[in-house]
Amino acid sequence: MLMAADEASEQVRELVELLLDRTRPDKRLGQHFLLDETVLARAVELADIQSDARVLEVGPGPGTLTKSLLDAGALVHAIELDSEAAAHLHRVFSAEIGNHRLEVVEGDAVAIAWPDGLTHVVCNPPYQISSPLIERIERYQRDALRMGNSGLAAVVLLLQEEFATKVGMTAGEPSHGPLGMSLAFSWRCELDLKVPPHSFSPHPAVDSRMVKLTPDDLVTVLMQDPGHPLGETLEPADARFSRLLVRHCFEQRRKKLRNRLANPPKRLLRIPGWHRSRWSDAVQELSKGDELAGLPSSFLDLRPESLTQQEWLTLSSWLSMLEIGTLQAD
């Protein structure tokens, strides 16, 4: 067993050294190559990769995680921005590319099209693309579900520790933000293995954290809860409206909700059925009901980070159903 582990570790280091023989890590691309076999194995285990998995890997670099995914039986679609790293992958995985178990595409993973039918995203992305990558994953999932496909079963990302805390909102109200809130509407977030700098070459200046995202429709959960107004009084709001509402209020997170809601979001007209007059009428009606089911007392005097993801969904649903005269002023 120990010999097998040593052999796997040696193979990982060999992949990194083969790439470093031809090029040096590019700081502009945020390249930190993963060396730790334990971390690689945990990523595959956490994603629950089976032999029928179709995995997208962003920024494979030397191919250490790529190899672990292939060894687990996955079909891998790898997107690499660095031309030298892409050429390296073609050299060391020529057999896997030849038998169509691996596809290597050179390009910007946030900008280019992703293949249909992906079941997982598993990667160690550059820190600087973490936020746009998660937004791209969300968009891919929405498009897949809209087309009637099953979409992604799981996402495993290795993120900067501080950013992972914001994604999972695990540090209380200070970690609440538009990204974590919007993500929580459709995904369950788990923070897993903490990864120290020495697990990479070159070493980053900060710790990393492995994060797993699993599809989880919070609206459906709330509607099945007999004690929640979404299961009795309210209809779910348009998901795009809920996300827009969150982003709008967090743009100035130091201000109270009453002040942020006084003006409509900039992109409100992009949401079907919404316009400035409807927004003004809904907010005017909302201000009459300081005690609304599913929302904290005097919620309009709270700041955005004080609401939970369930309360944000409830607020967006109240706004969607309110018209002048719906509520009676006290």
Image: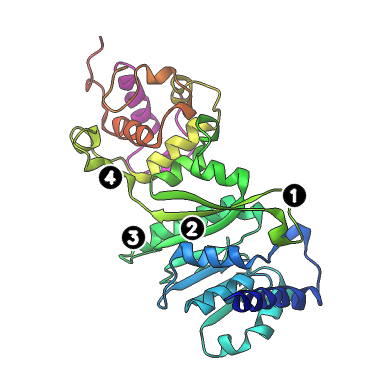
The magenta span reads 262-289
What residue is shown with label 2?
A: 137
Camera-nearest residue between 278 and 102: 102
Q: Nearer the viewer, mark 1 or mark 2?
A: 1
Closer to the chain start, of discs 3 and 4, is: 3
Q: Does dot 2 land on a helix, a strand or a loop?
A: helix
Identity, as a three-letter code, of the amino acid under mark 4 = Val
Closer to the chain start, of discs 1 and 2, is: 2
Q: Could you tell me if the residues under marks 2 and 3 are in contact, i.e. CB atoms within 8 Å?
A: no
Q: Position of residue 4 (x, y in %)?
A: 60, 78
Q: Nearer the viewer, mark 4 or mark 1?
A: 1
37 on left or right of 146: right
Closer to the chain start, of discs 2 and 3, is: 2
Q: Position of residue 321 (x, y in %)?
A: 26, 32
Closer to the chain start, of discs 2 and 4, is: 2
168 on left or right of 33: left
Cα–Cα span, label 4 and label 1: 39 Å
What residue is shown with label 3?
A: 146
Q: Residue furthest top?
A: 330
Cα–Cα span, label 2 and label 4: 22 Å
What residue is shown with label 1?
A: 205
Identity, as a three-letter code, of the amino acid under mark 1 = Ala
Q: Split into 4 quadrants, where in the image is the N terminus?
A: bottom right
Are there few (<14), some (14-19), or many (20+) residues within 10 Å of tag 4?
few
Q: Is residue 291 above or below residue 173?
A: above
